[in-house]
Image (cartoon, rainbow, N blue to C red):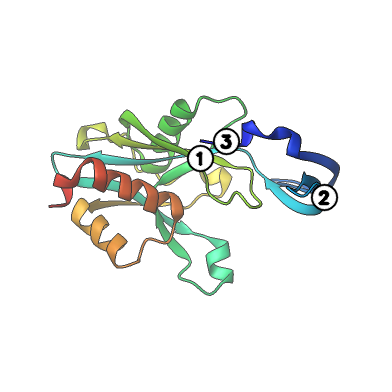
């Protein structure tokens, strides 16, 4: 199998221009790619960088339930879609922060639960054409005894998150009906259906 690391000589980065440097870093980057006929194709691309993230779908197998969140998403609002998306718990990692440790921290902040037994599903780019973010995605476990508080995120970060507990049957039906619109949530729901199909019976 060929990977990106097998052919670095074909591609090189030329000029770089910072367009914006705030919560996101937006950069225009010159990419030069040598084609099969020997010619060089040059393109400028705007690259969005805001760090890397994590996501987790906690499952209570005994009660056949999962924990999710619902929050306002401005891009969906601007596109005229339903703006309050149902998603798995997720967040951005601090620089050099361990992905698993970040996941457990985010679960406590957003869900108000202590999550256990993180089971890695994948490390994935969600929009590799223009966004540098890689997400570490996990399944996890929880029970009512793991509740620490109300959750809802950090108010000083502008988070206003509704915590949801759905049955696995509800989650599966939402996927089949096309009601899950968030990519990481679709991935983790499918992973749970493959690994634990009996929860959806």
- CA gap, disc 3 to disc 2? 22 Å
Question: Can you name the residue that lies furthest to the front here?
Answer: 37
- Residue, disc 1: 135
Judging by the rendered image, the residue that carries numbered circle 2 is 39
Does label 3 or label 1 sit earlier along the sequence?
A: 3
Residue 95 higher or lower than 132, as above or below: above
Q: Nearer the viewer, residue 11 or 51?
A: 11
- Indicate the secondary structure of the residue bearing disc 1: strand
Mark 3 lies on a secondary structure that is loop
Where, by quadrant of the figure, is residue 156 drawn? top right
Q: Position of residue 131 (x, y in %)?
A: 64, 48
- In the displayed structure, 115 sits above or below 176; it is above
Of circles 1 and 2, which is in front? 2
**In this rendering, is residue 71 above or below 91?**
below
Dot 1 or dot 2: first in sequence order is: 2
Q: Residues within 10 Å of mark 3 (few under 14, many from 20)?
A: few
Question: In which quadrant of the rendered view does residue 182 lie?
Answer: bottom left
Q: Residue at x 43, y 49 (%)?
A: 184
| Pointers 3 and 2 in contact (C-beta within 8 Å) | no
Q: Which residue is mark 3?
A: 3
Q: Residues within 10 Å of mark 1 (few under 14, many from 20)?
A: many
Residue positioned 49% across, 29% down in the render: 99
């Amino acid at each position: 199998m060929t990977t990106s690391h097998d052919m670095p000589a074909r591609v090189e980065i030329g000029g770089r221009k910072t367009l914006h440097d705030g919560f996101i870093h937006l950069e225009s980057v010159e990419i030069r790619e040598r084609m099969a006929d020997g010619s060089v194709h040059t393109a400028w691309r705007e690259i969005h960088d805001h760090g890397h993230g994590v996501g987790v779908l906690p499952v209570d197998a005994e009660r056949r339930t999962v924990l999710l969140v619902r929050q306002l998403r401005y891009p969906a609002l601007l596109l005229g879609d339903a703006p309050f998306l149902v998603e798995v718990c997720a967040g951005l990692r601090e620089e050099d922060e361990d992905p698993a440790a970040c996941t457990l921290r985010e679960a406590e902040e957003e869900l108000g639960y202590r999550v256990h037994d993180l089971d890695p599903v994948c490390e994935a780019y969600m929009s590799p054409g223009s966004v540098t973010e890689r997400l570490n995605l996990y399944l996890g476990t929880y029970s009512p005894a793991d509740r620490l508080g109300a959750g809802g995120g950090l108010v000083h970060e502008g988070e206003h998150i509704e915590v949801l507990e759905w049955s696995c049957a509800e989650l599966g039906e939402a996927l089949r009906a096309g009601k899950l619109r968030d990519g990481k949530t679709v991935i983790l729901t499918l992973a749970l259906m493959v690994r634990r199909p009996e929860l959806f019976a």
